Amino acid sequence: MRYPLAIALIFFVLVIAAMAQVAEKRISIQDTDRYIVFPVKDSDPRVIARILSAGTSIDRFTISLALGEPDYWVFFDASKYRGQTLTVRLDGNAGKEMLNRVRADSSYPGQENVYKEKLRPQTAFSSQRGWINDPNGLIYYGGEYHMFYQHNPFGWTHANMHWGTPSAPTCCTGRNCPRIVYTGTGAGIFRHGNCGSEQHSRIPAERR
């Protein structure tokens, strides 16, 4: 009987240790909030973060959360979760102090200067924050130009691949629309859509 008891005890200790390694923060999304904001410093260690609603993961990504002064801030659009409480959870050995400055807000720090930066392209599309690459679906439909692209909204490295989609009435201007697809698993996936609008998601094949 000693060996099964010892094995059970070891398993229990390992489970407790694993639970102790998970840092999390509950964030109430008020009516005036739009974002959950994250401070980023690219030289700091990368951690795995999850955002959960009622225990269900709604996003999973890697991020270099700033331990000191951040290089910049990134955001998760939480506007559809107003009136709810979301949980930000860090996996691995991340400490709870890394979540101290993660919060809900109506804007993100530095937003007032976005698209006004000295080196920001003004006649080519760029996202508000993060890595972009691999433009796809360059089409003109319904009086607007549309584009899909791969996007890491949480940093400047090739990771956390989301599909982004800007649209604009002219080819030299554009607006960022909500990210459409993200599996959180690294699996490849594609779905038609624009700005999350169903009426634009069924573009006739002959018009694509």
Image (tube, rainbow, N blue to C red):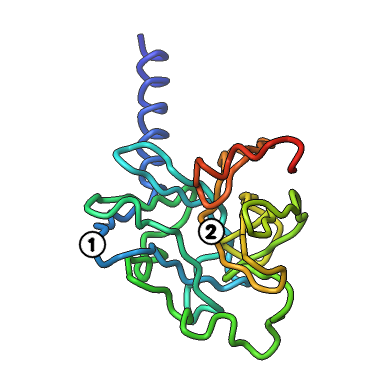
- Can you name the residue that lies furthest to the front here? 143
Query: Who's the residue at 62% across and 65% down the image?
Result: 168
Image location of residue 182, percent across then percent down: 57, 43
Q: Say which quadrant the N terminus sits in.
A: top left
Screen quadrant of the C terminus: top right
Crowd rating for badge 1 (residues with CA inside 10 Å; few <14, some 14–19, many 20+):
few
In front here: 72 or 14? 72
- Marks 1, 2: nearer the viewer: 2
Kindly report the distance in space between the C-alpha atoms of the residues bearing marks 1 and 2: 20 Å
The one nearer the camera, 96 or 35, is 35
Name the residue at 42% across, 65% down: 98
Q: How many marks?
A: 2
Q: Residue 52's spot in the image, x, y percent?
A: 37, 44
Percent coordinates x, y for residue 184 in the rendering: 56, 41
Horizontal placement of 163 versus 137: left or right? left
Q: Which mark is residue 31?
A: 1
Quarter location, residue 99: bottom left
Q: Nearer the viewer, residue 123 or 14?
A: 123
Residue 102 appears in the figure: yes
Asked where in the image residue 5 lies, by quadrant, the reply is top left
User: Which three-letter amino acid code belongs to the residue tagged 1?
Assistant: Asp
SS of the residue under disc 1: loop
Please state which amino acid type lies under the numbered disc 2: Cys
Contact? badges 1 and 2 (CB < 8 Å): no
- What residue is shown with label 2? 177
With respect to residue 38, does 57 lie above or below?
above
Disc on res. 71: none
Q: Residue at x 72, y 68 (%)?
A: 171
Mark 2 secondary-structure assignment = loop
The answer to whether residue 45 is left or right of residue 23 is right
For marks 1 and 2 on the same chain, the one whose residue lies earlier in the sequence: 1
